[in-house]
Amino acid sequence: MPEHTVNRHLRGWSAVVVILLFSLLPGVVLAAGPIYLDGQFSDWSGQPYITDPAGDGASNSDLRAFYWATNPGQEIVYFMFQRTASLNATYFAVLIDTNNDGDFSDSDDRLVIVRYTPRWFTGYVQIWVFDGDSNNISTNQGNWGDSMWGFGRRAEIGVSFADLGIDAHQTINMAAVAFPSFNSSYFDWAPDSGTITWAPIPTLGWVWLTGVIVVVVAIAWYTKGRFKWQPTSPS
């Protein structure tokens, strides 16, 4: 009776390769590309976001969606706000609970205020970052929003980890709000209740992903023909 040789290790590593490919590749195929702070918004496709119902905010500050993202190798958090179309200026804000204690007013917490003004050919955006004690940490500005020709719907910003007082992998709670002016009584929150819990972890890029796959395949190839299991023939 012929003796059958079964290479358990090769099968095991082959299974690992298959699992890695199926678990990693779909995420890469579906993952969005890097965010560019340029007032163009196609690069936000595939990024995490929440939606907000229409009609629950003032006419120029009816928040419809709130996006957030990081780029591989960058210590910057990007945010994008989308509202119901309007040609008037508005304010957005992101409240960040950096220590996850349910209170947004601690000195380590952050408040990011954004003023968005759509213009004929650009969307002018101003940013102020405050700590929980109302100290201004940084300011910035740029043409990062829809123009009037884009119906004044969207604006994007980027804030460094340093200005937010956070590190990569640190879990934070956050919420977005839109309001027409500082003395307004109309605030449109997203989410309407609760907060968003998130950890800003830059995703693996193609270089790192390729390296992981190459290493696994190399191990599987090296294992080929080694540590064979030979069942004992019945006597």
Image (cartoon, rainbow, N blue to C red):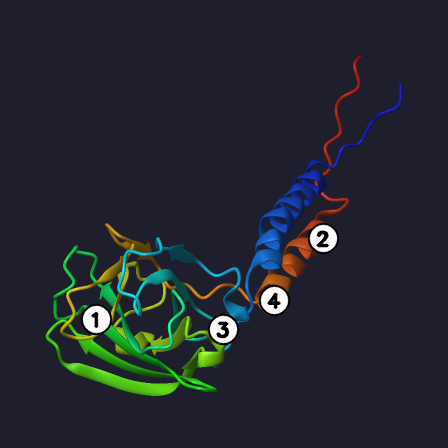
Locate residue 7, reporting x and y percent.
Answer: 74, 37
Q: Secondary structure at mark 3?
A: loop
For image coordinates 16% across by 56% down, the residue present is: 101
- Identify the residue under disc 3: 35
Locate residue 146, reporting x and y percent.
Answer: 45, 77
In 3D space, how far apart are the residues under numbered discs 4 and 3 (Cα atoms)? 16 Å
Locate residue 222, reporting x and y percent.
Answer: 72, 53
- Identify the residue under disc 1: 110
Compare marks 2 and 4 and give the one earlier in the sequence: 4
How many other residues sit within 10 Å of disc 1, few (<14), some (14-19) or many (≥20)?
many
Asked if residue 206 is positioned above or below residue 159 in the image, the reply reads above
- Identify the residue under disc 4: 206
Along the horizontal axis of the image, is 25 left or right of 134? right
- Of circles 1 and 2, the one toward us is 1
Q: Amino acid at mark 3?
A: Ile
- Identify the residue under disc 2: 222
Which quadrant of the rendered structure holds the C terminus?
A: top right
In 3D space, how far apart are the residues under numbered discs 3 and 1 (Cα atoms)? 22 Å
- Of circles 4 and 1, the one toward us is 1
Compare marks 2 and 3 and give the one earlier in the sequence: 3
Compare marks 4 and 3 and give the one earlier in the sequence: 3
Q: Amino acid at mark 2?
A: Tyr
In 3D space, how far apart are the residues under numbered discs 4 and 1 (Cα atoms)? 33 Å
Asked if residue 25 is positioned above or below residue 182 in the image, the reply reads above
Compare marks 1 and 2 and give the one earlier in the sequence: 1
Compare marks 3 and 1 and give the one earlier in the sequence: 3
Q: Nearer the viewer, residue 152 or 20?
A: 152
How many other residues sit within 10 Å of disc 2, few (<14), some (14-19) or many (≥20)?
few
Q: Mark 2 near mark 4, Cβ–Cβ under 8 Å?
A: no
